[in-house]
Image: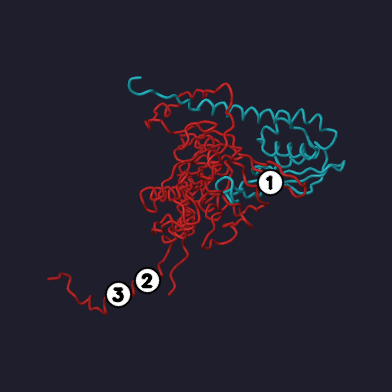
């Protein structure tokens, strides 16, 4: 993975994470930072495609919060997170900045790995529940064979 | 003529205080938390998100609580709140083929790759009231299979390969947005789909049913119905890449309808499409049928004058906030208008000599 692949992966992972889980994994005080953009609530228009594959159309909006920070070392962190939680956006932007510093190794293990594991586990559980409701057809022979 | 328009302030304040109290209900009953609404009345939450056209389960749960469970009032609250949010941009089109599937069925192919997955459905329940729920019975965890689902490609993609399914044209130019520009006719399909996606479920259900009963008949199969979570991506220009910033649950329905062919096109199947926020297959199937009915003109089919084929009729009336706004405004004071009508009717009666007639006709 390139650096930008890695970064987009963690930004998405943090954006989708429940705020409470993020707080539990990383309750620490933040290092000193400056706001480039204080948490700002808004929306993003979600698009679908006609017939799943055709022309794009506007389906409806989803709530988001965005924020940007700069650490004293100069690292800049951005966040665009789902929902209207300003604290989550702040934490996400700080994590994005810190993950670009030598703190990455520790934070990857402490925050990203559990988030990734939780997301994978939830997906796996859902897929197994769904698989349990899959129909196994069998054919009944009518009349005398 | 002036009519008193002041004097309502105290009555209004007291009415709202009573509304507050009525919403709370019997104080001996524990207050309902918005988390309980979100978790335990999730299909009501989904409907408010779909018709409110804003995906946020927390907000929708709050709106339902505030609206005392009145869906359309809750949708109104969400729509009003939405107008206060700046829009940062648009997502890339969601890839429903990559959906984390909870339910996926086809009425056209029994053995479709990926299988028939029932998911948490009301189908096959006996619709008998479960009095155990009233007493709060234990709910055991749902069974899990050893392994998860195999991948489930869109069923209609198999038909496309043979040319049996009409290809979906790519869009050209900017995607129209009815929240930015007023609805104008003729409305292109992208605009129609946006309006239907946020349209009233009951209205679309009735229209879809009308097509099944013969008003703009176009027999539909449910080619595929799928429900599950999809990731939403957006391009971040300041960084130059896309991130999957959200995960939302969607319901998608693709209907398969026959197309007889024309002088220039061979017979093939065509699609109606429904895509809805949350879990709502009644709405998604209805949307697909109405979308297909609205394509009648484009496909050169008989325009029988059926309501479901009339884009102006459907799109102008499918929004329950617009509809209830205009409907309910007539309960507001129209004292002056009515005085004018009263005068007019009296004048007409005088002119006809009606007032001179005795009460009894004989």
- Secondary-structure class at tag 3: helix
The chain coloured red in the image: B
- First along the sequence among labels 1 and 3: 1
Q: Chain of mark 3?
A: B
Q: In this rendering, does residue B21 appear at all? A: no
- In the rendered image, the vertical position of residue B205 relative to residue B97, given as above or below: below
**Residue B42's x, y, as percent?**
51, 37
Q: Do dots 3 and 2 share one subunit?
A: yes
Nearer the observer: mark 2 or 1; the answer is 1
Q: Are callouts 2 and 1 both on one chain?
A: yes
Distance of label 1 from label 3 (alpha carbons) = 65 Å
* Left or right: B68, with A44 as reference point: left
Q: Residue at x 79, y 47 (%)?
A: A35
x, y percent for residue B134: 42, 29
Q: Are marks 2 and 1 in contact (CB under 8 Å)?
A: no
Of the residues under marks 2 and 1, which one precedes in the sequence? 1
Residue B343 percent location from the top left of the image = 34, 74
Q: Chain of mark 1?
A: B
- Quarter of the image containing the N terminus of chain B? bottom left
Alpha-carbon span between mark 2 and mark 1 = 57 Å
Rendered position, B240 above or below B362: above
Colour assignment, chain A: cyan
Q: Secondary structure at mark 2?
A: helix
Check disc 1: other Cα within 10 Å, few if <14, some if 14-19, many if 20+: many
Residue position marked by numbered label 1 in the rendering: B234
Q: Chain of mark 2?
A: B
- Which of the two residues, B81 or B309, is positioned nearer the viewer here? B309
Residue picked out by circle 3: B346
Q: Are marks 3 and 2 in contact (CB under 8 Å)?
A: no
CB under 8 Å between discs 1 and 3: no
> Neighbour class for label 2 at 10 Å: few (<14), some, many (≥20)?
few
> Which sits in the foreground, B127 or B187?
B187
């Amino acid at each position: 993975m390139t650096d930008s692949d890695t970064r987009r992966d963690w930004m998405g992972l943090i954006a989708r994470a429940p705020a409470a889980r993020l707080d539990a994994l990383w309750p620490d005080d933040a290092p000193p930072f400056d706001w480039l953009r204080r948490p700002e609530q808004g929306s993003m228009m979600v698009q679908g495609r006609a017939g799943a594959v055709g022309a794009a159309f506007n389906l409806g909006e989803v709530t988001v919060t965005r924020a940007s920070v700069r650490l004293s070392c100069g690292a800049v962190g951005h966040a665009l997170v789902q929902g209207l939680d300003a604290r989550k956006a702040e934490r996400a932007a700080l994590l994005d900045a810190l993950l670009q510093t030598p703190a990455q190794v520790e934070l990857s293990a402490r925050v990203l790995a559990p988030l990734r594991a939780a997301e994978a586990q939830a997906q796996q559980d859902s897929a197994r529940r769904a698989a349990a409701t899959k129909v196994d057809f069998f054919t009944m022979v009518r009349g005398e064979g | 003529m002036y009519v008193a328009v002041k004097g309502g302030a105290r009555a209004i304040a007291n009415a709202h205080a009573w509304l507050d109290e009525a919403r709370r209900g019997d104080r001996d009953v524990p207050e309902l938390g918005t988390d309980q609404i979100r978790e335990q009345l999730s299909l009501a939450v989904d409907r408010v998100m779909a018709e409110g056209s804003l995906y946020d389960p927390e907000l929708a749960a709050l709106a339902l609580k505030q609206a005392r469970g009145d869906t359309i009032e809750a949708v109104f609250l969400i729509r009003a709140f939405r107008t206060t949010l700046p829009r940062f941009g648009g997502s890339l089109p969601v890839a429903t083929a990559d959906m984390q599937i909870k339910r996926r069925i086809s009425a056209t192919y029994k053995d479709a790759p990926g299988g028939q997955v029932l998911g948490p459905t009301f189908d096959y329940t006996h619709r008998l009231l479960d009095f155990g729920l009233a007493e709060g019975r234990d709910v055991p965890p749902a069974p899990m299979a050893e392994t998860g689902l195999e991948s489930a490609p869109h069923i209609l993609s198999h038909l496309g390969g043979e040319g049996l399914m009409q290809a979906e044209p790519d869009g050209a130019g900017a995607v129209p947005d009815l929240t930015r520009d007023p609805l104008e006719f003729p409305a292109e399909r992208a605009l129609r789909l946006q309006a239907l996606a946020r349209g009233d479920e009951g209205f679309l259900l009735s229209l879809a049913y009308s097509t099944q009963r013969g008003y703009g008949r176009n027999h539909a199969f449910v080619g595929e119905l799928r429900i599950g979570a999809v990731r939403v991506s957006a391009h971040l220009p300041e960084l130059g890449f896309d991130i999957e910033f959200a995960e939302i649950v969607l319901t998608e329905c693709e209907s398969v309808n026959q197309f007889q062919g024309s002088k220039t096109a061979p017979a093939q199947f065509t699609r109606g499409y429904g895509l809805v926020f949350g879990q709502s297959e009644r709405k998604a199937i209805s949307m697909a049928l109405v979308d297909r009915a609205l394509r009648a003109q484009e496909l050169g089919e008989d325009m029988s004058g059926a309501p479901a084929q009339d884009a102006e009729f459907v799109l102008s009336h499918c929004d329950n906030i617009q509809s209830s706004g205009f409907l309910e405004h007539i309960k507001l004071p129209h004292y002056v208008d009515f005085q004018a009508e009263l005068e007019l009717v009296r004048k007409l009666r005088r002119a006809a000599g009606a007032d001179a007639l005795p009460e009894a006709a004989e």
